[in-house]
Amino acid sequence: MNNIPLFSVEIGRIETLFIKEFNMKFLKILVLPLIIFLSACDYDVELIDFESGETLKGGFNINSRLTWVELKDGTRLEGKYVEIRNNDSFSFGNSTGTLTGSTTGSIFSGSKFGTFNSLSTSSLNTFSTSTTIGNTSIGYAILRNPDTKVMMEVVVIANLDNSGMGEARTNDGKTYKVMF
């Protein structure tokens, strides 16, 4: 016969249920918003044919670097883009100096009266750095679809806020202005 009291088995079962319930709450509270945030980094792109005025829609995701364009016939061209950022600027500086101050005052206590002069000198030394980020970057992608021979080359200049402009061309000769 097993000598384990009945309530210790029940406590173990309750603890197991609590851990499972906690894990589900953890997934819902922390992981789900993270997934939504990461998938919400999609940006819309418009490609405009300057000759015909035809507009194509597309987009890109800054996390996966996936970019895509949907052609008028419904074909979706996809590819990953590469980004070349301009150099960030970095500067630093140093300054030294001396501060001098004087104070003059009067003291009156009971029947005594006096004056005083005080002179103080202190030196200072500061060092500062500055980094500028947010220069423009150049993006490049080749988009394709394995079911078609049409490919597209895209070159853009992007700002830190992921807005930008550029040009795209297909291997069948069409040229588009790109805005996002």
Image (cartoon, helix red, strand yellow):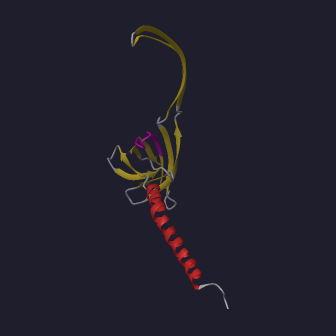
The N terminus lies in quadrant: bottom right
In the image shown, does 102 or 140 lie closer to the viewer? Answer: 102
Residue projecting furthest to the bottom = 1
Q: Residue at x 52, y 38 (%)?
A: 85
The relative height of residue 6 versus residue 145 in the rendered view (above or below) is below
Residue 131 versus residue 150: which sits nearer the camera? 131
Residue 59 lies in the magenta stretch: no
Q: Which residues are magenta?
A: 154-164
Q: Where residue 177 sits in the image (x, y, percent)? A: 39, 43
Residue 86 appears left or right of 109? right
Give me the residue at 37% from left, 52% from top.
56
Is 30 or 116 nearer to us in this picture?
A: 116
Q: Quadrant of residue 168?
A: top left
Extreme residue in the right direction: 1
Note whether 7 is above or below 57 in the view shown: below
Name the foreground residue: 61 vs 112: 112
In the displayed structure, would residue 31 be above or below residue 85?
below
